Image (spheres, helix red, strand yellow):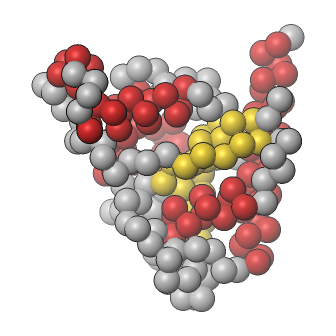
Amino acid sequence: MAVRILGISGSLRKASTNTGLLRAAAKNINSEEATFKIANLTKIPVFNEDIEPEINKNTDTVESKAINRFIKDIQESDAILFASPEYNYGISGALKNAIDWASRKGAFSDKTGAIIGAGGFNGTVLSHINLRNVGFFLNIHFINKPELKIRRFEDMSIFDKNGDLQNEKLQTQLDQVVQSLIEYTNRLNNNKDD
């Protein structure tokens, strides 16, 4: 059975290089091995326990639909590919916020995961560490290698103006991350069946 991968970008920008990495990740996937979908975080409101009962009760609002779609996408996936920028040495507020909403339903528990990212000076190293720490609590089983952390400002030709990856060497590394995630997910799922 094909592994169902959900891509989650920590950036809401239209020309986000992190969302571009997710598009590039989907490009070379063998459809017999995996399917790939990118989550949309743009309409998810800031998490607030005071509005949570209303969000859960009134499912017709834009916000409720966005939250419930995101949670359903996670629940229907086998693996999560996070593309995380680095904001102030951590993950973005948008990503943490979406995770906070989904964690209320335990949506991430027992999923496999991988982290990629494009960012500034650190190449998203610190956001990867931050996201792994959050993932420990959520019971996400992350792959350790290979890694992909791109310092996008060192070479402006790595991405085009739309945020799409233009570098074949990095595309190959990204394909290796995705393949490792697929293999790890299959290995863990096979162990569950035993």
- For image coordinates 77% across by 76% down, the residue present is 169
Note whether 8 is above or below 124 in the view shown. above
Note whether 170 is above or below 6 in the view shown. below
Residue 4 position in % (x across, y down): 69, 36
Most foreground residue, 100 or 26: 26
Note whether 128 is above or below 67 in the view shown. below
In the picture, the quarter occupied by the N terminus is: top right
> In this orientation, does residue 191 appear?
yes
- For image coordinates 74% across by 51% down, the residue present is 178
User: For residue 28, which quarter of the picture?
Assistant: bottom right
The outermost residue toward the left is 50
Note whether 182 is above or below 111 in the view shown. below
In the picture, the quarter occupied by the C terminus is: top right
Q: Is residue 189 left or right of residue 59?
A: right
The outermost residue toward the top is 194
User: For residue 33, which quarter of the picture?
Assistant: top right
User: For residue 166, which quarter of the picture?
Assistant: bottom right
Tell me how many marks there are.
0
> In this orientation, does residue 129 appear?
no
Residue 70 position in % (x across, y down): 44, 36
Residue 82 position in % (x across, y down): 55, 49
- For image coordinates 36% across by 22% down, the residue present is 104
Most foreground residue, 136 or 55: 55
- For image coordinates 26% across by 38% down, the residue present is 62
Residue 132 position in % (x across, y down): 53, 43
Most foreground residue, 53 or 58: 58
Q: Is residue 154 left or right of residue 114?
A: left
